[in-house]
Amino acid sequence: MSDQLTIETTATKSGAVECLGLHFESDEARRAYFSETLRVKLQEPEFRKIEGFPIGSDEDILRLSDPPYYTACPNPFLADFVRCYGKPYDPKILYDRKPAAVDVSEGKTDPIYTAHSYHTKVPHKAIMRAILHYTEPGDIVLDGFSGSGMTGVAAQSCGYPEPEFRKRIEDECRDAGEELPQWGARRAVLGDLGPIAASISANYTLPFDVEAFQKKARQILDELRSEIGWMYETAHEDGRNGMINYTVWSEVFSCPECGGEVVFLDEGLDASTGRVKDGFPCPHCSASLTKDNLQRRMDTLVDPDTKKPWKRVRFIPAIIHYSVGTQRYQKKPDSNDLETLRRIADLPLHPCVPTAVFPIDRMYHGSRLAPKGFTHIYHLYFPRAAHALGALWQRANEVPDRRLRNAILFWSEQALWGLSILNRYSPLHYSQVNRYLNGVYYVASQVSECSVWYNLEGKLSRLVAAFRDIPASRQPVIVSTSTAAKTGLSAESIDYVFTDPPFGENIPYADLNFLIESWHGVQTDSKPEAVVDSPKGKGLLDYQRLMQRCFAEYYRVLKPGRWMTMVFHNSRNSVWAAIQEALTAAGFVVADVRTLDKQQGSYRQVTSTAVKQDLVISAYKPNGGLEQRFELEKGTDDGVWDFVKTHLRQLPVFVSQKGKGEAIAERQSYMLFDRMVAFHVQRGILVPQSAAEFYEGLTQRFEYRDGMYFLAHQVDEYDKKKQTVSELKQLELIVRDEHSAIQWLRQQLTERPQHFSDLQPQFMRETGGWSKEEQRLELSEILRLNFFSYDGEGEVPVQIRNYLSKNFHDLRGLAKDAPALQAKANDRWYVPDPNKAVDLEKIRERELLRTFEEYRASGVKKIKVPRLEALRAGFKRAWDQRDYAMIVEVAAKIPETILQEDSKLLMFYDNAATRLGVG
């Protein structure tokens, strides 16, 4: 633990506290001072104009906040936090880290991970691995998309790791020959646009009295039992009173043939499988029915708030599950049960139940709610559940101690979805707690209406168990409710960024958070939310630009030479391309992209295509020295090689998994070229070298091993570590286009030269997934432009002799006529020696540019199946010639999906369009 933490702990025991350099008599005095400071700040008109400021009154924001460590609005104390606990950037301090893969499945059953549900989260133990690798104790970690706050939990937990976890990490380091991590807490700055996400982050990371929490929560449950227990009483068959655990409600439909009522739970649900039956007979006329041909029935009710007629799909209580003592039973509702439900329905709506209206026309899943009659928050609760939650919420908000109150609300939130009509009945599950469908407002045809005790008693025990052993003297974390595009932090003040941002249209966070946020009275301003959301008018380009702004802010506040780790969950190639473009446009350089193979428990490197697994992206902010030198060297060969040297220094030298070495994608020539080009383009600089010139320069300046390039001092380490593994595994490639086909062939031919007839059957098998949107090439064409063949006619490869003979007038007659190359079954193909590959690359580039010229000159409006390598080569040449209009012109001729899914084309187009003021 740090000295600062020891001081804070001692001060707390004596009653006095220190906070952001100020001293207070007590923690309550600290809260009073900062609450008043925040109250004054909220009255400043300019403060409320900050982008992404949540929707809510001053009183609601103040009630939810616990300043300075947490505010339910942009946190005005962030700068003070960093000033007190951060370390100014010092370029003289040596910092050297290589990218590290993070096991994003680590610890998903940990009690802390499961303490509170949120739409997505990365386990804190996985984040701990990354924080330990990239930082030292006392460093400041930033997560601008904090969600449930796991980055903050991880930063704190580095100071009190579980013994078993610590031993595992240290054993792994010893096995890999690496230094042991420096244990000790890190500080964290957490931010999220969603008020409920920021609130969860704060409750996970700000200490509270666990024993007082348990006592108060138990008291509230007992008080609720005294007040509304009668609502959940039911008679057992022997006359004893039972307490209802949950009531199963069934939607009622009409038969399309006879119009008779069809109780879905009785007729359409297979209780043995828990699934909807493919077909079933009408109980009245025996007509063949399916879920699809049933007709929806609507009840006309009295709206509990407006008192006006309200139409909603018809539900009836079908099963009551209850307990008498420790024994559990179930029955059909009797007349007394129905009378109790009618009595409850006649009661007025509890004043604590929110009456907010869903913004149906601007919600991603709004069409799922409105047709069934659910337009307001309170519509999602049967009357009994609404009364129970209202009474619970009232008591939680009456707790006088602010921190204890927020902890009670944190616990109470667990029931807001679980007691709603969204909680599906699942007959195959023993527990009916929190059976709602994640990521969507979905009202099933069978609902479990749980009691508040059934839902929350188990959660109370789990929360106590999760937080009981966490030290109360944790390093403070600071939480802000704000957009990641405007953190309020000073430049170059953050030591490391770990982030798990929203990806495309995976999850409409603002929509889903609306339910719980309405109970708090503080809601998300979704205008700056980085999502693809058609009801809100946000497309993929909007998402990309919003993410670019967020990454640009990360880049601004991150210290030079430091790292960002990002977890990616979306399998759409277009979103993956948008993320890559946003990252590089912000200034970051991607150094490693890996995917976790959950079956093998190991990581695979990814080169271009997103996959249906979690990706871990490691990117760094170039150090100030490189940027300063590049200003002097830009547009020159020196600038190119300065970047490559710096980039190679940032890459891992050797990667092994379970005794086997792995090829490092980022060290291969084509990846180095792509990173170099992106570095120039995103800074608006002409790329001074062609691919051929670049590849020739690589072989002259750097050490070459197994298809990879190294700095001179790195190659010895590589050679030594290679001797410690049984084999070197190649990258696992999926052939879906010309580029990946070239890399696949390179893998095959690196091992040994092969005949065309041997390659053809393998190639046909591998190319079954070739993209329908890219021109398919024959194997002979790919071989001709990218590889050499032995044909028994001398040392000069036949491709080059043929090319020279065809173009001797351009090459001053250096060759004689020769027949056109034909791929023959008896030719053996091999990977070109790096020193001889330059001429072949020139041939390839010439042909690609010829194809690009055909596209440009073509009169067709859309080129349905273009050759992407030709477009990439043409866009690069146009960029070098500053012909931005040509890039935009040809881009208009290719399908939009191709442009969106190819990160290289998107990069050139985005930058060209920006310079022309297009889009």
Image (cartoon, helix red, strand yellow):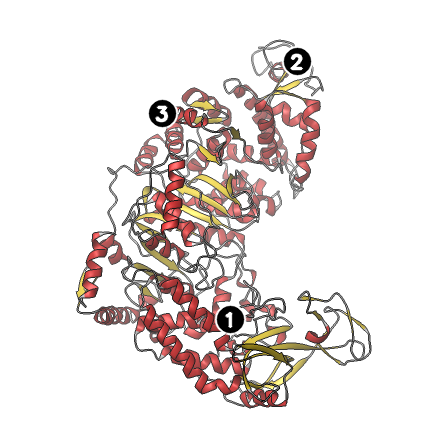
Name the kind of residue labelled 3 in the image. His
* Quadrant of the image occupied by residue 465: bottom left
Q: Nearer the viewer, residue 56 or 859?
A: 56
Estimate the x, y position of residue 257 in percent, counting from the top left.
81, 77
Q: Residue at x 36, y 67 (%)?
A: 72
Q: Secondary structure at mark 1?
A: helix
How far apart marks 3 and 1 lie (CA) works out to 58 Å
Q: Nearer the viewer, residue 66 or 554?
A: 66
Q: Nearer the viewer, mark 1 or mark 2?
A: 1
> Relative to 369, is 259 above or below?
below
Q: Secondary structure at mark 3?
A: helix
- The residue identified by callout 1 is 417
Question: Neighbour class for label 3 at 10 Å: few (<14), some, many (≥20)?
Answer: few
Q: Is residue 687 left or right of residue 361?
A: left
Name the kind of residue labelled 1 in the image. Trp
Name the mark on residue 713: 3
Q: Give whichever of discs 1 and 2 has the lower sequence position.
A: 1
Question: Neighbour class for label 2 at 10 Å: few (<14), some, many (≥20)?
Answer: some
Name the mark on residue 300: none
- The residue identified by callout 2 is 791
Q: Give whichever of discs 3 and 2 has the lower sequence position.
A: 3
Question: Neighbour class for label 1 at 10 Å: few (<14), some, many (≥20)?
Answer: many
